[in-house]
Image: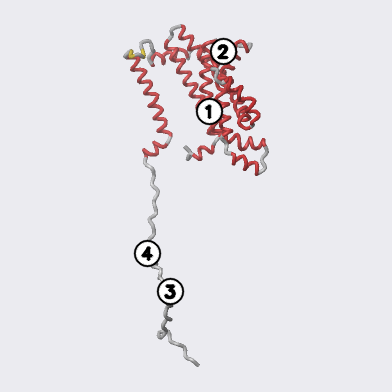
Amino acid sequence: MRALQRVEDFTPPPEPVGARPAVTPPAHVGQGVTPLPLPVATPTMPSLWRRFWEGRGAMLLMAAISIASVLLFWQLATHYKLDAYIRFNNIPTPAAVLEKVVEVNGSPKFVTNIGISVRRILLGFLVATVLGVGLGVLIGRYRLVRGLAMPAMEVFRPIPAIAWVPMSIMLWPDNEVSIVFITFLGAFFPILLNTVHGVEAIDPVLLRAARTLGAGEASLLKHVVLPGALPHIFTGLAVGMGVAWVSLIAAEMISGQFGIGYFTWEAYSLISYAEIALGMITIGVLGLLCSGGIRLLAKLAMPWQAHSAGGR
């Protein structure tokens, strides 16, 4: 029986001619060495200034600076009677306007005019919202409705709302209804066009996915089309509210007997400069409140936008 060869006496067989020598892969740098643990980053609290700048306090401060700068320029221009192409000789000072505010608050006439204008703007804007959004969804969604309705809308759209004053007086039996109609026209077309654009901008993949999941046409409009078009719809509402106020004030100045526009025009006729400035400021404040209401409604209707923007 042949004895086994010892390991130390073993010699490897010679490599064949032309064979490539075996290459030993290099060891990895640091192989076999236990890495040191990385330092854990400790969360640092943002500075007081950064928290203030990213919060609402900074926005309120900038708003106060913006309004204060306008009031300061107004005070200086009226005090020194600035006359450099723009004349401030007959412009009332902020103190005179403030005195007029105290004076008119004692009589119900000014408050009544504000209430009438607010009622007109809300009624006309509400009708414009219902018709503009409803017709905009149909035009943006269905080709037949777009082909039948859009050409007529494009014919009426360039006509300014104020140009409808004589026609509206002949159309409607009551002066109040004609003013509301003019306000409606001012808000209708911005809402309509933005709604149409919002419906047409919806990703077709979302529509196909909803169809695949078994959504019907009514469910598709409710759960896909309307939520997808809401950002454009609220943009149209904001623009339409501004145009509605312009149309309302112009209509009240031309054919109205009450309202803040009529109050401002009557003050001009009576050469009451402080009341003119008061009427203009009141219109601006009312428009600001309406726009703020639309922004608040947009946040309530689209909570996902706040989350996507980091809650700001």
In the rendered image, the vertical position of residue 45 relative to residue 66, given as above or below: below
* Dot placed on the residue nearer the N-terminal end, 4 or 3: 3
Q: Amino acid at mark 3?
A: Ala
In-front residue for pair 111/228: 228
Q: Residues within 10 Å of mark 3 (few under 14, many from 20)?
A: few
* Mark closer to the observer (1, 3): 3
In the rendered image, the vertical position of residue 198 relative to residue 6, given as above or below: above
Give the alpha-carbon distance from disc 4 to disc 3, as whole Å. 30 Å
Give the alpha-carbon distance from disc 2 to disc 4, as whole Å. 86 Å
Q: Amino acid at mark 4?
A: Val
In-front residue for pair 108/265: 265
Q: Is residue 177 left or right of residue 64?
A: right
Question: Where does label 1 land, which residue?
Answer: 294
In the rendered image, the vertical position of residue 231 relative to residue 29, given as above or below: above
* Dot placed on the residue nearer the N-terminal end, 2 or 4: 4
Question: Where does label 4 land, which residue?
Answer: 29
Question: Where does label 2 land, which residue?
Answer: 165
Question: Where does label 3 land, which residue?
Answer: 19
Please, what secondary structure does the residue beneath circle 1 have? helix
* Mark closer to the observer (2, 1): 2
> Are the residues at dot 3 and dot 2 in contact (C-beta closer than 8 Å)?
no
